[in-house]
Amino acid sequence: MKHTIILVGADKGGVGKTTIARALLDFLHRKNILVRAFDTENPRGTLHRFYPGISEIIDLGDVASQMKVLDTLTTSDIKVTIVDLKAGNLSTALDTFEKIGVLEAARNGEFNLALVHVVGPAIASLDEMGEVAKYTDGIAYVVARNFINETNFFEWDERTYKKYFANLANAREIEVPKLNEMAYEQVDLAGVTYSNFVSNINAKGAASNFSFVLRGYVRKWLSDIDVEFEKLEVVKWVMDAARESTSISSENSDENSDDE
Amino acid sequence: MISRLYSDLLHLRDPRGPKIYDTDLSGNSVVTRFPSKTLMLDLAKVGDQLKLFDGVLAEPERDHVVDLSADMLTRFFSIFKEINFEEGAAEAGVEITIHHIVDPSVPSVRTALETSRIAPSASFVPVRNLAIGDCLVVPGAAEIYQKIEFDSEIVMPNLEPEVQAWTEAPDFTWSGLLLGRHDDIPYEIRLVITNFLQSIYDQTDAREEEFK
């Protein structure tokens, strides 16, 4: 199974980048796909707070950290890596990856690479897409329009956006639906995954007492965002690969039992 | 009227009375009768949604009466469906009964039909209040009414204005009448009101035996 790296980033802070990384991790977990995650919001690490068991805080500017992510691709048993890029660091990270040959390796098919570019409602997001476009050739590029924590409408005209979007080769887009603000805050305060919030499980793994109403809103939001994720090519790669490896392992176990 | 009636009669089952939720913000509704037991709710506010739905699940052993104003019906059931309250209620052991007042008009009966299909596990009870007319005599409405799958229906007899006035008196309670606390009301009037209650009682489904 070929390794898949999914970068989640934005050049502007506060657009809900980590929220989407969390939602993606949640989605893959519910599909029983093992994932490892790297949180580059060092030293604090927001993603790490919700996924302490499977994530690590790193500094992507540091060579040792780059090695941790990239040099382990072939040796790690876990074949999906999500990297939550530090806010405002998307272009820098892509530039670094270009320089050290990561993007080239992905283009050559050594592993799958996807970039989920989270854009907010500001006009600056359109310019960001233009800047990022030069790196996206040969990788899966996803523009995630995030409606989660913004109550206002997107500032840009839909036609202008479509024009920008049309200029991006092989770009896909998803719309991240709005999550009720109180529900969002409560999940955040609880420091749990979305799924655990829905299942009423606290950060220590014990039964909790979260609001049924808010859990309901999160459940509905997860189901809506699942539909968006399922549209993505990168998610299909991961799911197909997971299915393949499951069927291979079950064939192997059948053979083993025949031997017995 | 039906929410007031139930809120009142449920005091006979539990002296604490039910918890009452009123979405009619005009204040001219069930809250006027039970001000200390009624929570006024604006369902557009998430905080108020929590008070209602979480409030019910927090006390499943207690009776709860939700008085839904017509303008809040769509919003209520939209939230109800979105948060899958039906499942939450079932897990908590809360039985839901929807009493839907049906006006003598096609749109009203159509709304009742749609509402009856929202929560399959809930008991749906259309209420035809003869004081405002009967939908069964309205062309088109009766046909739609026949499509409603209900567990029981209540036909509220028409109360003469004089009798109605007694029931609207500030100190009048239906439960008080049944407990013999309204000797001040003329005997004939008490008899009419008692018959009115008896009529509703007789139409209450057998599944609501406990309520009876």
Image (cartoon, coloured by chain):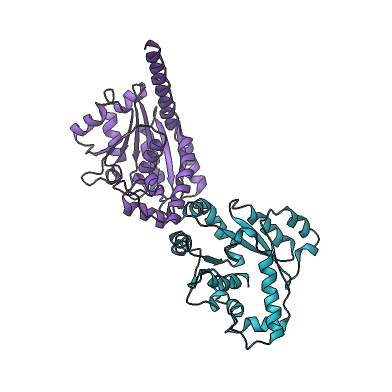
Chain colours: A purple, B cyan
User: Left or right: B56 with respect to B162?
Assistant: left
**Which quadrant of the figure has residue A144?**
top left
| Viewer can see residue A21 | yes
Q: Quadrant of the N terminus of chain B?
A: bottom right
Q: Residue at x 74, y 64 (%)?
A: B105
Residue A150 place in picture, x, y as percent: 42, 54
User: Left or right: A208 with respect to B183?
Assistant: left
Q: Front-most of A29 and A1?
A: A29
Q: Is residue B88 above or below residue A247?
A: below
Q: Quadrant of the C terminus of chain B?
A: bottom right
Q: Front-most of B16 and A170?
A: B16
Residue B189 place in picture, x, y as percent: 70, 83
| Viewer can see residue A154 | no
Residue A145 place in picture, x, y as percent: 44, 45
Q: Front-most of A55 and A126?
A: A55
**Which quadrant of the figure has residue A119?**
top left
Farthest-out residue, top: A259
Q: Is residue B52 above or below residue A75?
A: below
User: Left or right: A83 with respect to A180?
Assistant: left
Q: Residue at x 49, y 40 (%)?
A: A227
User: Left or right: B129 with respect to A117?
Assistant: right
How many marks overall?
Answer: 0
